[in-house]
Amino acid sequence: MHLGHQQLFLRQNKDGAIVVIQTDYENLSPNRFRSRYTKFPIIYYPLKNIKHLSGKEFIDLLTQEFPNLEKIIVGFDFHFGYKASYGIDDLKKMFQGEVVIVDEYKIDNIAVHSRVIREYLRSSKIEEANRLLGYNYTIEGEIIQGQGLGKKQFVPTINLNIKLFLIPQEGIYITQTKLNNKLYNSVTFIGHRVTTDGKFAVETHLLNQDIILKDEKNIQITFFHKIRDNKKFDIYEDLKDQILDDISKAKQYFKDTNG
């Protein structure tokens, strides 16, 4: 639901709706999260349920399920049907209503595509990804039990299990964490805990705030900037010093951002 998609939504009338072909991997805004970024109702088709359909069968499905369908709005590179082997010319032939084609949308000559945003996130270019998204990248995860070292030897953290969302590259990030329906400035670690147990983790530390978990099962993390890469330390005390330095950088970031 990035700024390129928003160009399609601008062409909708008040009775329009959005059709999403839903996959189960590396989503930027999976399932219900898409509704944050549009006022239109969203109809989901799981890819696994329709990927066998020919182009005509897919269009027939839409016209059968939406008998009042008069207009289809798509991007310039739209493909559909089995193995995405059907294009815009096929759509115009198969659909009896109006077909609106939206040109490629660019920001400073950078094409706004999901694949571009994914690549930015995979390479830790958070600001660039956020710019093309039109919002700050946010993931949600289930709260899980961590290894228990944070509160004892370093700083307390909330550990998360992330599903469906694309997870940015390993590293330390300046973030905000939504907990108890409130936003808290935070530092988030993504990666393998190479200094301790070697396991992959996503864990977040709230700045200037004691972590009080009530009945929450899920929390959200919003990304602003990457501080550094993941790094192995031979001595725990060195890791603790680095964590405190990361926290200091994050506090300064929010101080500068908020004036």
Image (spheres, rainbow, N blue to C red):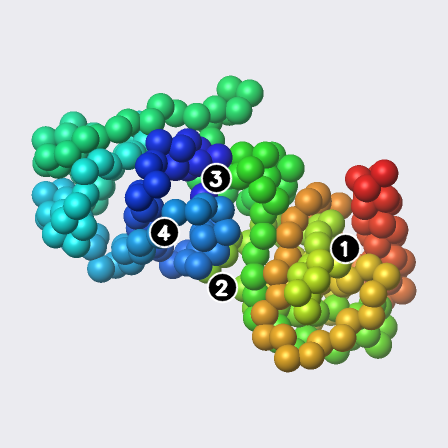
Identify the element where label 3 is drawn: loop
Spatial CA distance of label 3 from label 4 is 16 Å
> Which amino acid lies under the numbered mark 3 shown in the image of this protein?
His
Neighbour class for label 3 at 10 Å: few (<14), some, many (≥20)? many
Give the residue at mark 2.
163
Percent position of residue 50, x then y: 20, 55
Q: Amino acid at mark 1?
A: Asn
> Which mark sits nearer the N-terminus, 4 or 1?
4
Taking 203 as reference, is 104 above or below it?
A: above
Q: Position of residue 48 (x, y in %)?
A: 25, 59
Q: Are marks 4 and 1 in contact (CB under 8 Å)?
A: no
Q: Which residue is mark 4?
A: 41
The numbered mark at residue 2 is 3
Q: Amino acid at mark 2?
A: Lys
Residue to which mark 1 is pinned: 185
Pointer 2 or 4: first along the chain: 4
Residue 232 in view of the camera: no
Q: Are marks 1 and 2 in contact (CB under 8 Å)?
A: no
Give x and y (percent) for residue 202.
64, 63
Kindly report the distance in space between the C-alpha atoms of the residues bearing marks 1 and 2.
23 Å
Looking at the rendered structure, the secondary structure element under dot 2 is loop
Q: Quadrant of the C terminus?
A: top right
How much space separates mark 4 and mark 1, taking CA atoms? Answer: 32 Å
Residue 69 in view: yes
Please give left or right for residue 198 compared with residue 94 in the image: right
Residue at figure coordinates x 35%, y 52% from the top left: 42
